[in-house]
Amino acid sequence: MRLRINSASSGSVFESLIKVELAGPKQITLRTDKRSTTIPRPAANRKKRLWACLVCLGLLTGCAKRPQATVTSGIEDPESSWIRVLLFGNLNECTVYSYGGLMVEDRAMGATAWFPESDQDLTIALHEGRFQIGDHLFNGDLLIRTQTPFVFSINGSVFRGHIRLLRNEEGTSFSAINQVPLESYLCGVIPSEMQSYWEPEALKVQAIAARTYCLYVKNRFGQNRPWDLKRTQAHQVYRGLAAETTTTNEAVFQTEGLVLICPDADGKQTLFPAYYSSSCGGHTENSRFVFGDQVPALEGVSCPYCRKTTRSEYYYWSGLFYSKEEINRRLMERYPSLATLETIDRIEPARQSEGERITLIRLIGKNGNIGFLRGEDFRLALDPSGRKIKSAIFSLRTSPKGYEFVNGRGFGHGVGLCQSGAQGMARLGKTCEEILEYYYPGSRLVRITKTP
Ligand SMILES: [Zn+2]
């Protein structure tokens, strides 16, 4: 996001110009669309770049373009409606860069320090339990406010919004948390979770599911911790501004504020965890058997729509072998309570759902003791990536040395929205509302209101 003109260290004008040219497309990831705003750089920088470009014209076919950035959407919304995303934990040092400079607030002193824009990243490190930036030492945790267009990079990754740095209790490390308006957060999630060239109606479905899920998690768990969501598959993948595309941003803006609700146990209409997964393999799963929560909109439906839109190796998969020793070791490591079985001697499906997904596995120990695991927990204990044993729809073929996973179908946990199915329905001309009603039956679409 910045032009690094490094002539002082390179010693060669030509070499520095090459660096400008190479840095351009790689680092300027801000997209332009009707919301775009050109961000003027300070005069000194413009001068430097102008000089570089002028010489550049004679030597190269082009030169780096002026960076353009869309202003972060929702920056005027009340911060209580923003999302807090854990970007990094356990840091000792980080580098931060932002257009327009940074306002750093010391939360203990209530004091602020202004760091104007420069071509250099700011290095923020812990020094004897206190944050240090250059010659400045801070007593408390830090809130770093960005300026227009409210974009920053931290350790090379680019995000929208502000940053909060929180020390652990001992003051030996810190976490970096991105505070970002809801809709801008979603702009970094949708292209990380769905192909940006998919049907517009499917992208809108994804935006509404992701918005509902994120607000559910924030309301349910965010009050007890300083962040709402992780940026990984543990919640939903968020790759920030570098992932944004025009089509996925449009899907977010066109569905702004729309979420799904359904009745809770007391019959009250409320947000629910609108889970989604890649390809259900023919039938979505009841959430009760995978995550243990009973939600009327997550009971599972037949899905004839994903077979044609899922890559064949993700829809049908087979032939994975795990030795008895490896299964024993991985399950015992993940679930120490299984030690009561001494050694796992036999594994067999104990319950299968309508879609042939194994929802409960029976483990029989050498000593005759019996243990159970949910099918989803079993497969992720053996393959934490979830990319080899792709779902809990499989058959187990027993051999003296171990087990072969055969007849596998689908990719992911299968609860809620089938993403490939949504694409299949959209291709058939179904609307966003029809697709949501199909995968989250009985749910209602409503618009949230912003409270100050
Ligand atoms: Zn499906």
Image (tube, grey):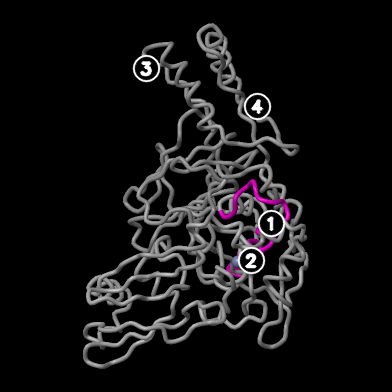
Residue 268 quadrant:
bottom right
Give above or below for 273 relative to 159. below
Name the N-terminal-most of marks 1 and 2. 1
Mark 2 surroundings: few (<14), some (14-19) or many (≥20) residues within 10 A: many
Mark pair 1, 4: CA separation: 36 Å
Principal secondary structure, stretch drawn in magenta: helix
Give residue 153's position: percent from left, percent from top.
51, 41
Q: Is mark 3 within 8 Å of ligand 1?
A: no
Q: Amino acid at mark 1?
A: Ala
Q: Amino acid at mark 2?
A: Leu
Q: Amino acid at mark 3?
A: Ser
Give above or below for 283 relative to 186. below
Asked if marks 4 and 3 touch (Cβ < 8 Å), the reply is no
- Which is closer to the viewer, label 4 or label 3? 3
Q: Secondary structure at mark 3?
A: helix
Q: Secondary structure at mark 4?
A: loop
Q: Is residue 332 magenta?
A: no
Relative to 331, is 64 on the left or the right? right
The residue singled out by tag 3 in the image is 10
